[in-house]
Amino acid sequence: MDITYLLWLQDFRNGINDALTPFLEWVSLFGVSYIVLFPVFVYWCWDKRKGLMILTAWKISQTINAMVKLTACVYRPWIRDARIIPAGDAIRTAGGYSFPSGHTMMVTPIYGGLALCTRKKAVRAFWILAILVTMFSRNYLGVHTPQDVLVGFVLGAASIYIAEWLLGYIDRNPSKAGIAMFVCGAVGILTLVYVTYKPYPMDYVDGKLLVDPVSMTIDAWGDAGGLAAFALAWYIERRWIKFSATGWNLKGVILCVIGLLVVCWMVGSLKVITRDMFGAHVGKLVYQFAFFLFVMVVWPLVLKLCNAAKER
């Protein structure tokens, strides 16, 4: 039934000459690239606690995705059925295993977290719609089955619940914050070790390996290792920086926008630099540490010092 649905979408896509494909490709691409600008801005400028919740949910979701995807090892739709032909350039960014959808598990904690952080129904509806459109785009482009995106949504939503519970626990037990952060980091490292050394299917077709497990673990090093990087940066900020969100004043917004420009550079260029310098696996890990140290330590310190100078 899932393949039948994808074939129906494929026929529809071909019938309209791929008119929707560029837009839905952009939706998918944005969902795994610059989407992080939203929670970072919330964290720096609007509400530190809300931004922290979204960032926490995001990294928990990515770690769960790495663990489940590299445990289930489900092949992509076009491997299961040769009639499936992915649209546009989607196949280039959708290698490896299929279940659950990494794009869905990326956008659900971020867009979903943003929806929970606002009381305006129209804004909340927009963020929910953004999740649904991203989920649909993965089916429409032919790179994921319905169950891939549905399970991805459920796990992403569960990550929001876990993050909120974790932050609530720390709020109630501040003396145990360090332990909670250590556990987060340990989970990330253990997941990284697990996905690196577990056995993988080695299925060949016409002498070609269907999915190279080594290449599949590259993203996992960033996803699971990123949770450890996040936990370390979170601990440093809570222990020594202790900044406050700037609020909606002109100076604060300008400072946050400047910081976001650096984040854009990191997302667009630093990943390539760290990969070239350290290799694919370690480069992913180095990038995650650099990213979170900037987002949660370096720029918050800049914001705190600028705020202190303003008060004097």
Image: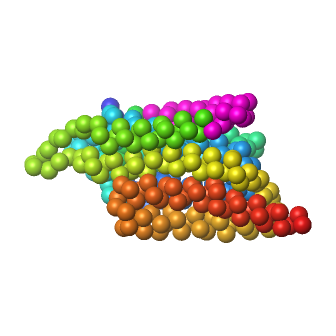
- Is residue 259 found left or right of 109 in the rendered image? right
* Nearer to the camera, 156 or 130: 156
- The quarter of the picture where the N terminus appears is top left
- Residue 101 point in image, percent of width and height: 42, 42
* Nearer to the camera, 294 or 146: 294
- Is residue 251 found left or right of 10 in the rendered image? right
Against 281, is 275 above or below?
A: below
Q: Residue at image x 74%, y 68%?
A: 254
Q: Residue at image x 76%, y 41%?
A: 119
Q: Residue at image x 40%, y 49%?
A: 221
* Nearer to the camera, 166 or 120: 166
Would you say residue 8 is visible in this rendering? Answer: no
Magenta stretch in the rendered image: 151-178
Against 269, is 155 above or below?
A: above
- Is residue 227 found left or right of 68 in the rendered image? right
Q: Is 227 covered by the magenta stretch?
A: no
- The quarter of the picture where the C terminus appears is bottom right
In this rendering, the count of numbered labels is 0
Outermost right residue: 312
